[in-house]
Amino acid sequence: MTLGLAQLGLNLMPTTLAGYREKGILRRMATTPIPPSRLLLAQLAVGVLCAVASLVTVVAGVLAFGFEPPGLVVAALATFALGVLAIFAIGMLVAAVAPSTRVATGIGVSLFFLGIAFGGVFTPAETMPEFVLRVSDYTPVGAFMQALRASWGGDWPQPLHLAVPAVYALGCGLLAARLFRWE
């Protein structure tokens, strides 16, 4: 789930918005009374719908195929919401400041691969060196993965692993709304 959402939020969404800017679509939208924050919220809504589709897939897996459900459902849902918001807020910030589709793609792909490398997507957290694991605690994907794994295993996530995505979501979301350019 994290891999797909990170691909969508860090790579595809910023590239799409930067492409809109390059093609002049955003310039034409600037003549309407729609503020940039509404456009960014609409993109976030698309991401949330994809996240809901991920949750539906998990529920289908649990009900139809005997997939192991999260040990703490409330913690898993809170973690999932914070992680999705953080990933998409970072993607929106990239889209807000990237001057072209190529730049947005380069930044997005770089953030995607750094996120999944430090996030424990390629290598399970328990096999990562201690230093990398500590760095991972402060990355949005790393904190998201560790909090999700803890809640799935029946433990409440560490406060740090919930605070990190929350700070990224809030900080990057506010910066994206502030720095967004129509042209």
Image: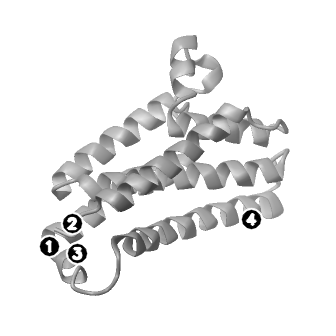
- Mark 2 and 1 residues: CB-CB less than 8 Å, in contact? yes
Reply above or below: 25 against 155: below
Q: Which dot, 3 or 2, sits closer to the camera? A: 3
- Which residue in the structure is indicated by mark 1? 23
Residue type at mark 3?
Answer: Leu
Q: Which residue is painted at 84% across and 46% down in the image?
A: 72
Residue 9 quadrant: bottom left
Label 2 to label 1: alpha-carbon separation = 6 Å
How busy is the neighbourhood of tag 3: few (under 14 within 10 Å), some, or many (20 plus)? some
Q: Position of residue 15 (x, y in %)?
A: 28, 59
Reply above or below: 35 against 57: below
- Which residue in the structure is indicated by mark 2? 19
Reply above or below: 88 against 143: below
Answer with mark 1 or mark 4, whichever residue precedes in sequence.
Answer: 1
Residue 85 quadrant: bottom right
Label 3 to label 4: alpha-carbon separation = 38 Å
- Which residue in the structure is indicated by mark 3? 26
Label 2 to label 4: alpha-carbon separation = 35 Å
How busy is the neighbourhood of tag 4: few (under 14 within 10 Å), some, or many (20 plus)? few
How busy is the neighbourhood of tag 2: few (under 14 within 10 Å), some, or many (20 plus)? many
- Which residue in the structure is indicated by mark 4? 60
Q: Which residue is painted at 21% across and 85% down in the image?
A: 31
Q: Which residue is painted at 50% across and 65% down in the image?
A: 47
Residue 89 vs residue 105: left or right? Answer: right
Q: Is residue 1 visible?
A: no
Q: Position of residue 92 (x, y in %)?
A: 38, 57
Label 3 to label 1: alpha-carbon separation = 8 Å
Residue 26 vs residue 63: left or right? Answer: left
Label 1 to label 4: alpha-carbon separation = 40 Å
Residue type at mark 4?
Answer: Ala
Answer with mark 2 or mark 4, whichever residue precedes in sequence.
Answer: 2
Q: Is residue 141 visible?
A: yes
